[in-house]
Amino acid sequence: MLKGLALTPPVLGRISIGKVIEKNGKRLPEKDDQFTITSQVQGRDGWLLHPLNDELRQAQEGKLRSIPIRLLFNEPELNFRADYTLFDRNTGRPLCVGNGETCKRQGEDGIKTLPCPSPDACPLAKGGVCKPYGRLNVVIGDDDPLGSFVFRTTGFNSIRTLAARLQYLQAISGHRLACLPLELRLRGKSTRQSHGTPIFYADITVRSGMRMEEALLAAKEVDEARQVAGFDQAALDNAARQGLGNGAFEDNEEDSGTIVEEFFPLPDPKKTEADSSAPNKPTLADKLESLATESPSPGVSP
C-alpha cells in the first residue's frame, strides 16, 4: 500500500444540491431545490448526468428530492467524514484539516499536527476560507455493492443533521447501519440569515412508506443473510478505517480543484464592501433595551 495515499470509498458518481454556473465571466456555485446525480465526467456545461438521475426523477414528477440508499459501513464516521478544511486556492491542495481540537497542516517542513481552535479563532482562517466540510458516501441500486456516490457539503445544517441521524440509526439498529433500507432526503427551512428564503439541506431517514419497525426487521434479515453468505462487515469497516488513515488528507489534488470552485468560492468583494459599509440593523434585544431606556417605568412620573 502506498503510504500517504488515503484510500477512500470507490466513487461511481456525485450527488449535489446545485451546480456551478458561469456568470459575468466567473464560475460561481448556484443553489437548487433538488438533488442532481451526476457521473464523474465533465463536459462543457458541467458534470454529465448519471443514468440514475433521470430514472429516479421520473418517479418523482421531475423533482428529485429523495434517493433510496444503503450505506457501506456500520460505523457512522466511515460513511460520513466531516472536518474543518482549508484549501490552498492556488494549487487546490488541502492545506489544513482539523476537528476543533487538533489539525494536520501542510507547511514548508512537511505535515505537522497542531492545535485546532476552529475557524472562528484561527488566524489562518480569516475571511471565511476555512469551513466545515463533509463527505457522505452512499450506495444507490444493486449493481455495485461496494461502489458509492459521494455527497459533498459545507452546509452546517446538512453536516449536523447527517451526523446526528447516522449516530441514532446505528444505535437503534443494533449496529446494523449498513443493512438498513434508507433514504437521502432533501429538507427546507428558513432562517433569519436567509431573510425568509428557503435553504435546503440533506437528511437521512428510513425509506418512504416504511415504519421504523419494518426497517429494523429488514436490516436484521439482511444482516443474517450476509452472515450466512460469509459477508464480514466488521472486516470491511476495519479495511475502510485503515485506508482512510493511510493518508494525511482525504482529498487529492486531482479532485480538490473542482471542490474549491464549488464549495469554497472567494467572497464577492463588492458584496463584502457593501456589507461592511452598511449600518448594522438593530436586533430585537437592541430595540427592547432602547425602549426600556426611553420609556418611564410604570407608576413613575416623567
Image (spheres, grey):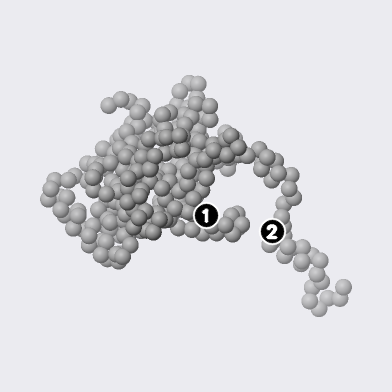
Of 124 and 36, nearer the camera is 36
- Residue position for label 2: 283
Whether the residues at callouts 2 and 1 have beta carbons within 8 Å, the answer is: no
Residue, x 50% and y 26% (percent of image)? 91
Name which residue type carries label 1: Ile
What SS does tag 2 mark?
loop
Q: CA distance from mark 2 to mark 1?
A: 22 Å
Q: Residues within 10 Å of mark 2 (few under 14, many from 20)?
A: few
- Residue position for label 1: 199
Of 202 and 160, nearer the camera is 202
Q: Name the spot of residue 84 as percent of width and height, x first.
A: 48, 40
Residue, x 35% and y 43% (percent of image)? 50
- Which numbered marker is on residue 161? none
Q: Name the spot of residue 266 as percent of width and height, x first.
A: 58, 36
Q: Name the spot of residue 255 as percent of width and height, x first.
A: 42, 32
What SS does tag 1 mark?
strand
